[in-house]
């Protein structure tokens, strides 16, 4: 379900749909809890930081991973990213190659991560982590994998989109939660609140009750030079396209038309023709997210034309307190050292 559009009722007050699915949610949640609690994941010879989230769909994991990767490098490490590569065909372990790989082969998020540091796509995360270590990586950042626990992580940072929250608070399929929140919170080490909004209040209270540290960060948009006064056709296929549209509007851009697609949507030639024709007929400039734009890389024909005509809005995740980010890197490394000492004894 991660690659499809979330059912609208997930982000509404619990109604008949969620109630009808409650037995299935109970079964799903029970299995998820048992898997998380009973997992004995293999350990690797490097610090491992997991960037996870509580729900299906986007919550800012990839921008967080990028921010952490930059901080780890600044601290003197050689970081690397480990990801499953959702939407890609590679089983792995495969080192992402920006010159040749496409989103169809490795997924969209790995293409963004690989711009920052070595990135491995692997369905079996333990072998992927080892591939990174073999390449000289000494600080592994795992994008997702919090619930599966298929490789040991020294620290789990759970991201929270404060505006979107956890929807109706129910477990799949009645809601967006990947497992009961109380069970997920037991395995988290800290919560990163991204942006403002009351929708995340439930998670913040749960984190406080569980005595989990709460960090805060904001998504800061880059600039689209020359487009400040021009009408835009904004399109996106991410977990929450409305966040992208709102980011453009709050930054002072004028959206004349918008198109929302499902998460990780692979644009078709028909999509490309429709978008290009709409932009040309109405005199609009095409704009999308970086995550959407990488899915158009190495394309030809109508998709290649769409790629050439589209500008991508870059974003950066900025921690409210940089000291907390630096302390996070140090904490992960310290836990790894303690793990090594414990294994040696």
Image (cartoon, rainbow, N blue to C red):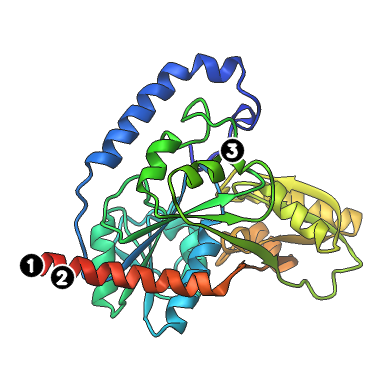
Q: Residues within 10 Å of mark 1 (few under 14, many from 20)?
A: few
Circle nearer the N terminus (2, 3)? 3
The x and y percentages for residue 68 are 48, 70
Q: Looking at the image, can residue 304 be seen? A: no
Mark 1–mark 2 CB contact (< 8 Å): yes
Circle nearer the N terminus (1, 3)? 3
Mark 1–mark 3 CB contact (< 8 Å): no
Viewed as shown, does residue 294 lie left or right of 232? left
Above or below 233: residue 172: above
Q: Looking at the image, can residue 126 be seen? A: yes
Viewed as shown, does residue 201 lie left or right of 260? left
- Residue position marked by numbered label 3 in the rendering: 5
In which quadrant of the rendered image does the C terminus lie?
bottom left
Distance between the Cα atoms at labels 2 and 3?
45 Å
Secondary element at image label 2: helix
The x and y percentages for residue 56 are 50, 41
Distance between the Cα atoms at labels 1 and 3?
49 Å
Distance between the Cα atoms at labels 1 and 2?
6 Å
Residue 80: quarter of image? bottom left
Secondary element at image label 3: loop
- Residue position marked by numbered label 2 in the rendering: 341
Viewed as shown, does residue 316 lie left or right of 139? right
- Residue position marked by numbered label 1 in the rendering: 345
The x and y percentages for residue 189 are 39, 55
Looking at the rendered structure, which numbered label has been put on residue 168? none
The x and y percentages for residue 215 are 54, 60
Write the residue at 48% across / 68% down: 113
């Amino acid at each position: 379900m991660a690659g499809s559009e979330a059912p609208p009722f997930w982000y509404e007050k619990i109604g008949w749909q969620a109630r009808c699915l409650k037995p299935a949610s109970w079964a799903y949640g029970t299995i998820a809890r048992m898997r998380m609690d009973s997992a004995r994941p293999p350990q690797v010879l490097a610090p491992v930081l997991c960037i996870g989230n509580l729900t299906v769909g986007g919550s800012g994991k990839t921008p967080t991973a990028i921010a952490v990767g930059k901080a780890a490098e600044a601290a003197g490490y050689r970081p690397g990213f480990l990801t499953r590569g959702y939407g890609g065909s590679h089983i792995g372990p495969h080192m992402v190659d920006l010159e040749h790989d496409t989103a169809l082969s490795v997924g969209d998020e790995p293409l963004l991560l690989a711009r920052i540091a070595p990135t491995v796509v692997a369905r079996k995360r333990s072998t992927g982590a080892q591939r990174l270590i073999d390449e000289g990586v000494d600080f592994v950042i795992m994008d997702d994998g919090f619930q599966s626990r298929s490789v040991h992580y020294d620290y789990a940072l759970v991201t929270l989109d404060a505006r979107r929250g956890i929807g109706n608070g129910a477990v799949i399929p009645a809601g967006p939660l990947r497992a009961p929140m109380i069970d997920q919170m037991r395995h988290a080490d800290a919560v990163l609140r991204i942006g403002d909004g009351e929708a995340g209040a439930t998670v913040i209270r749960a984190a406080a009750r569980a005595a989990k540290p709460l960090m805060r960060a904001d998504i800061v948009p880059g600039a689209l030079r020359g487009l400040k006064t021009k009408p835009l056709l904004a399109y996106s296929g991410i977990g929450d396209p409305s966040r992208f549209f709102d980011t453009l509007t709050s930054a002072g851009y004028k959206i004349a038309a918008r198109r929302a697609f499902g998460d990780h949507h692979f644009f078709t030639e028909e999509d490309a023709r429709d978008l290009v024709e709409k932009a040309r007929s109405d005199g609009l400039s095409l704009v999308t997210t970086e995550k959407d734009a990488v899915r158009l890389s190495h394309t030809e024909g109508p998709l290649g034309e769409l790629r050439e005509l589209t500008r991508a809005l870059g974003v950066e995740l900025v921690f409210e307190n940089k000291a907390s980010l630096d302390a996070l890197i140090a904490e992960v490394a310290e836990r790894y050292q303690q793990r090594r000492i414990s294994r040696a004894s």
